[in-house]
Image (tube, rainbow, N blue to C red):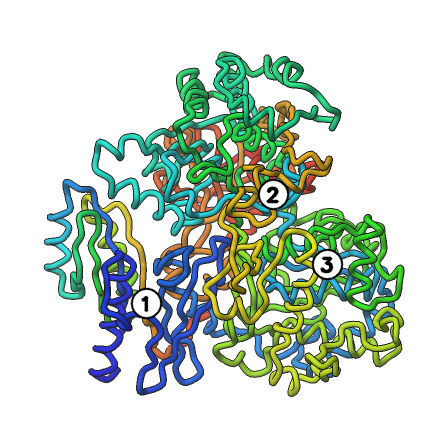
C-alpha cells in the first residue's frame, strides 16, 4: 500500500468513525470519494440479516476492497456489525463455484451452461406438475418475482416456497390474522423514542446488533436521572449478550411466553388500566376458533392467567409479572416489543404473535412514536421478497392469494398469461414439500439462495432420498445441499449483480452491480430466464402467453422483446429494473405502493407505502395506519387499520390459550434443546465461514450448558458430548461458561456448522396456522463420549 | 495492512482509563472522544491480528461494546475454504 493511499484510507476510516459518532464534518469530507487510483464507492444494503443496514462498497480493480457503514442510510447511520464489516470478504472464498457441474456416475463433472440448461429444461418438461422451486428471503425482489411468474403461471403448480417459512411465516400470519395485512406498522425510529424495550426470546445484541446499539447507546448517553426511566427487559430461556445489558431478565419455561402475554392482558383488564377508547374504537375480539366474542367473554377467558397461575406455569415471579402488567398499564410508558426466531419458531407461533399484538392493542401502545410491537426478520429480503412478492405456495404478489379468483385474474392479466394458467390450489408448504420430495410425489426441485441440506429440521426425514431425485442447486459455494444435487449452478453473489431487497421496516433498497461474478458464475434471474426460454423453444405450452409469445419475455420501454435469455445480451441490460417496475404495478393496488426503480436508485432506501405528493416528491411512510404519516389513512381517523378483512378498520384481539409443546423432556430425554445463531455467522455459515476472521472467531459449533447442570453431569469445557433425540444424534464439544447460559434443564446448540448438523436432532412439528417449524424446543439426552 | 475504525463504548466510571489504555496502544489512534464513546482507528499487519486487537479492546475493563464503522481489507489474498 503506497503511503498516500494508506493516508487516504486512514483518513476515510477516521471520517467514517466521526460521522458515526455524530460529529459535524466539513462539507464533502465524508461519503463516496473516488480516489485518483480508481477506488469507487457505491451503496448497497448489507447481504446478511433483515435489519437492512446500508453499506458503502469500495471497489478497485474489479474487486471489492473495502466496506463502510453508509452514513446516509437511516437504518444504521454509518454503523455496521461484525458481519457487515466483513461483507466484502464473502465474495472471495477460495472455493467459489465458478462452473456448472453435473453429477454423472456419482462424480461431479464440469459442464457447459448450454448442457446444464438443456438438462434442467428437459427434466422440468418431463414432469412439470411435480417440479418445485425452493428459495429464500435472500432472493432479490426481481428474482423472487420472476420465479413466482415461472412457477405460478408457467408451470401452474404453485410449488414455490422460500425458507422464510422456517423463520418468519408465523410473523406474517400473525400480522395478517390481527391486522388483515402483513408487515409491521412501526419503524426503527421508535427505538429512538421509546423508554422501554422488551425482547421476547430475542438475542438482538448478536442477531441485530446495530438496532441493539441504537437503543443501548441512547440509554447510555442520557444523564442518570433520565436513564433510570429507560428500561430494557429481556424475556428468554437463555442468558445471552443481550441479557448483559438488560435491566431485568425474566427466564421462563419454554413455550410459556403464551402464558406471560395472556397474564399481562389479564392484568390490564382486571386493573382497568387498558386503553378503553382505543380498544372500543380500533379493536374487536375473536375466539381461538375464529368466532366473534365480546370483551366480557375475553375477560372470562383470561381468568386462567392470573398472576399466581401464570407464575406457576411460566416460572416467572409474581413480582415480575405484575411489573409487566403495570408497565403496559402506564399510559405514559412508551414500549417497543421486539421478537424474531424465539417467538416465530414455535408450534403456536402465529398465536404467540397475536398475543403480543393483544398486549399492545389493549394498552393502546401502537401507532404512537416510541410504542410498537415489532417483529424482526433474519434475512435481507424476507419481507421484500418472500412476503411482499409472495413466493409462498399459497401466495401471489403483493398480498394476493392463489385461492382468490380475482387475484389470479389480476396477475394473469398483467402477465398476459392464458386465463386459468394459475392453479387455484396452493402448492406444498415447506415441510410438506420436502416430505413429498423424499416420497417421490415431487420429482424435481430447484434450490436457490438457501441451504436446506443443513437448515431443514429433522434432516434424516426431510432430506431423505434427495440425492436420488432431480435436484438442481444454484449457489455460490459448495454446501450440504450442493452435495446432494444432480446439477450445481454457480451464482453471482450480492454486488456481483443488480438487486433490490426489502428489510424488516418496509424499507426497499436498491443497488447496482459493482463487480463481475467470477468466471462462469451468473445471476439467478438469468438462470431461470434461460431455462424457461429453452422450454419455450421446445414448445412447452405453459411458457406461451395469450399471444403465443414467451411468458417471461423481458421487454424494453417500447414493448420490444429483449433477448435477455442470452447471457451476452443479459449483461448489457438492467433486467432488474424491468422486472421490478412490472412487479411494482401490482403493489399500487394493495396499499403497499413501492417507489419506481429510478427513485429507489436515487435514495438510500424508502419505506412503503411510497406515494407522490402534490409537488411530485416521492414520500415514504414511517408509521403505517397513522394519520399524517400513512397516506391511506382517511382524514380524521387518527389510527385506521384499513387492512381489516371485515372492512371495519379494526384489529382483532385473539383469545389464544396456552398449548403445551408437542415434545417435552421426560425420563428418557430429560433436557430441552434450543438451537440458534451466533454473532459471527450468518445462518448456515456458507458465506461467513469463508471469511477467515469470522471463522477463526467461531470455528465450530458447541453444546452450551448451564454450569449447575454441567456440574451435576460431570461435564467440563471441551468434553465431547453426544446430544441425542428421538430423531438423531450429534457429537459436539461442551461449552459451560461460554457466551450464553441456557436455563437449567436445557442446552443450546448453534446451527451454523456444516460439520455438526444439529438439525439431524431437531423436531419438525410446526404451527398449525403458519406451518413454521419449532427449532427452539425438543427433548434430548446428553452423554459424554469417551 | 487492514485499517479499520471503531466506536468504543465504555462505562462512565472507566471512560478515562479506557481512553488512556487505547491511546497507549501502538496500533490504535484515538481520533475523537465524547462523553459516551471513543472513536479509534486501528492498523494491523493482517486480518488475524486485527481480530485479536478487537477482542483485546472488548476485554478492557469497563468496555461495554464496540461498533465497527470502517474496514479496509485489501490484502490481495483469497480466503481458504474452511469447511
Q: Left or right? Give the position of A392 relative to A778.
A: right
Residue holding disc 2 = A634
The mark tally for this picture is 3
Quadrant for the N terminus of chain A, please: bottom left
What residue does disc 3 label? Answer: A466
The chain containing the residue under callout 2 comes to A
Res B71 label: 1
Residue at screen point 70% across, 75% down = A102
Q: Which quadrant holds residue A233?
A: top left
Name the N-terminal-most of marks 3 and 2.
3
Q: Nearer the viewer, mark 1 or mark 2?
A: 2
Gap in Å between the C-alphas at discs 3 and 1? 41 Å
Residue at image position (30%, 61%) is: B51
The reply to whether residue A683 is in sight is no
**Within 10 Å of the Cα at label 2, are there few (<14), some (14-19), or many (20+) other Cα atoms?**
some
Q: Are marks 1 and 2 on the same chain?
A: no
Q: Could you say where residue A751 lies in the image, as x and y percent from the top left?
A: 52, 49
Residue A336 percent coordinates (x, y): 44, 37
Q: Nearer the viewer, residue A335 or A209?
A: A335
CA neighbours of label 1 inside 10 A, class few (<14), some (14 to 19), many (20+): many
Amino acid at each position: 500500500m503506497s503511503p498516500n493511499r494508506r493516508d487516504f484510507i486512514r483518513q476515510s476510516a477516521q471520517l467514517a468513525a466521526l460521522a458515526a459518532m455524530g460529529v459535524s464534518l466539513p462539507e464533502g469530507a465524508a461519503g463516496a470519494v473516488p480516489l485518483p487510483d480508481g477506488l469507487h464507492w457505491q451503496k448497497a444494503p448489507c447481504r446478511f440479516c433483515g435489519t437492512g443496514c446500508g453499506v458503502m462498497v469500495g471497489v478497485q480493480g474489479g474487486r471489492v476492497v473495502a466496506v463502510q457503514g453508509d452514513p446516509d442510510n437511516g437504518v444504521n447511520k454509518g454503523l455496521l456489525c461484525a458481519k457487515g464489516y466483513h461483507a466484502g470478504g464473502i465474495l472471495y472464498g477460495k472455493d467459489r463455484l465458478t462452473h456448472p457441474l453435473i453429477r454423472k456416475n456419482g462424480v461431479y463433472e464440469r459442464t457447459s451452461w448450454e448442457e446444464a440448461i438443456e438438462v434442467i429444461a428437459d427434466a422440468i418438461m418431463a414432469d412439470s406438475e411435480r417440479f418445485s422451486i425452493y428459495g429464500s428471503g435472500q432472493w432479490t425482489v426481481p428474482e423472487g418475482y420472476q420465479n413466482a411468474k415461472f412457477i405460478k403461471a408457467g408451470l401452474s403448480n404453485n410449488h414455490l416456497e422460500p425458507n422464510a417459512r422456517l423463520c418468519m411465516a408465523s410473523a406474517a400470519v400473525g400480522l395478517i390474522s390481527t391486522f388483515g395485512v402483513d408487515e409491521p406498522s412501526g419503524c426503527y425510529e421508535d427505538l429512538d423514542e421509546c423508554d422501554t424495550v422488551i425482547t421476547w426470546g430475542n438475542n438482538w445484541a448478536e442477531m441485530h446488533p446495530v438496532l441493539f446499539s441504537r437503543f443501548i447507546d441512547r440509554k447510555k448517553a442520557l444523564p442518570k436521572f433520565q436513564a433510570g426511566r429507560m428500561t430494557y427487559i429481556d424475556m428468554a430461556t437463555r442468558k445471552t449478550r443481550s441479557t448483559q445489558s438488560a435491566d431485568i431478565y425474566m427466564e421462563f419455561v419454554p413455550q410459556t411466553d403464551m402464558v406471560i402475554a395472556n397474564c399481562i392482558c389479564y392484568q390490564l383488564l382486571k386493573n382497568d388500566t387498558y386503553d378503553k377508547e382505543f380498544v372500543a374504537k380500533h379493536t374487536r375480539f375473536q375466539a381461538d376458533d375464529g368466532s366473534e366474542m365480546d370483551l366480557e367473554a375475553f375477560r372470562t377467558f383470561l381468568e386462567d392467567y392470573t398472576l399466581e397461575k401464570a407464575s406457576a406455569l411460566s416460572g416467572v415471579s409474581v413480582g415480575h409479572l405484575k411489573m409487566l402488567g403495570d408497565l403496559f398499564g402506564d399510559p405514559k410508558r412508551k414500549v417497543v416489543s421486539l421478537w424474531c426466531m424465539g417467538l416465530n419458531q414455535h408450534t403456536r407461533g402465529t398465536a404467540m404473535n397475536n398475543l403480543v399484538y393483544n398486549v399492545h392493542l389493549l394498552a393502546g401502545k401502537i401507532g404512537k412514536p416510541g410504542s410498537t410491537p415489532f417483529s424482526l426478520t433474519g434475512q435481507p429480503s424476507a419481507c421484500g421478497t418472500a412476503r411482499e412478492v409472495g413466493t409462498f405456495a399459497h401466495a401471489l404478489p403483493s398480498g394476493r392469494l392463489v385461492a382468490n379468483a380475482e387475484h389470479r385474474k389480476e396477475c394473469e392479466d398483467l402477465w398476459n398469461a392464458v386465463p386459468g394458467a394459475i392453479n387455484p390450489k396452493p402448492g406444498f408448504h415447506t415441510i410438506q414439500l420436502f416430505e413429498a420430495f423424499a416420497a417421490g410425489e415431487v420429482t424435481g426441485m430447484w434450490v436457490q439462495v438457501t441451504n436446506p441440506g443443513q437448515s431443514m429440521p429433522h434432516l434424516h426425514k426431510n432430506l431423505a432420498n434427495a440425492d436420488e431425485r432431480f435436484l438442481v442447486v444454484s449457489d455460490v459455494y459448495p454446501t450440504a445441499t450442493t452435495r446432494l444435487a444432480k446439477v450445481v449452478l454457480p451464482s453471482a453473489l450480492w454486488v456481483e449483480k443488480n438487486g433490490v431487497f426489502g428489510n424488516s421496516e418496509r424499507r426497499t433498497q436498491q443497488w447496482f452491480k459493482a463487480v463481475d461474478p467470477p468466471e462462469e458464475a451468473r445471476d439467478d434471474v438469468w438462470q431461470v430466464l434461460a431455462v424457461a426460454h429453452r422450454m419455450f423453444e421446445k414448445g412447452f405450452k405453459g411458457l406461451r402467453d395469450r399471444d403465443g409469445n414467451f411468458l417471461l419475455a423481458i421487454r424494453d420501454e417500447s414493448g420490444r422483446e429483449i433477448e435477455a435469455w442470452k447471457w451476452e445480451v443479459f449483461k448489457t441490460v438492467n433486467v432488474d429494473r424491468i422486472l421490478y417496475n412490472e412487479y411494482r404495478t401490482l403493489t399500487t393496488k394493495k396499499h403497499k405502493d413501492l417507489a419506481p426503480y429510478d427513485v429507489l436508485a436515487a435514495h438510500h432506501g424508502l419505506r412503503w407505502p411510497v406515494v407522490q405528493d402534490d409537488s411530485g416528491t416521492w414520500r415514504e411512510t414511517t408509521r403505517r395506519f397513522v394519520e399524517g404519516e400513512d397516506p391511506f389513512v382517511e382524514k380524521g381517523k387518527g389510527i385506521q387499520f384499513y387492512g381489516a378483512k371485515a372492512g371495519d378498520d379494526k384489529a382483532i384481539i385473539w383469545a389464544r390459550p396456552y398449548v403445551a409443546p408437542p415434545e417435552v423432556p421426560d425420563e428418557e430425554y430429560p433436557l430441552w434443546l434450543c438451537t440458534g445463531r451466533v454473532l459471527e455467522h450468518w445462518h448456515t455459515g456458507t458465506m461467513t465461514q469463508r471469511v477467515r476472521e469470522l471463522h477463526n472467531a467461531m470455528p465450530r459449533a458447541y453444546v452450551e450448558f448451564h454450569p449447575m447442570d454441567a456440574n451435576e453431569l460431570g461435564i467440563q469445557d471441551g468434553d465431547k458430548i453426544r446430544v441425542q433425540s428421538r430423531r438423531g444424534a450429534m457429537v459436539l464439544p461442551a461449552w459451560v461458561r461460554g457466551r450464553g447460559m441456557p436455563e437449567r434443564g436445557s442446552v443450546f446448540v448453534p446451527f451454523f456448522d456444516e460439520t455438526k448438523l444439529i438439525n439431524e436432532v431437531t423436531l419438525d412439528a410446526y404451527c398449525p396456522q403458519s406451518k413454521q417449524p419449532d427449532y427452539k424446543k425438543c427433548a434430548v439426552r446428553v452423554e459424554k463420549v469417551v | 495492512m487492514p485499517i479499520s475504525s471503531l466506536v468504543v463504548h465504555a462505562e462512565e466510571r472507566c471512560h478515562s482509563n479506557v481512553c488512556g489504555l487505547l491511546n497507549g496502544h501502538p496500533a490504535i489512534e484515538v481520533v475523537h472522544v465524547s462523553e459516551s464513546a471513543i472513536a479509534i482507528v486501528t492498523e494491523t499487519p493482517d486480518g488475524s491480528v486485527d481480530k485479536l486487537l478487537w477482542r483485546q479492546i472488548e476485554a478492557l475493563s469497563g468496555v461495554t461494546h464496540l461498533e465497527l464503522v470502517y474496514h479496509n481489507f485489501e490484502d490481495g489474498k483469497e480466503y481458504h475454504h474452511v469447511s
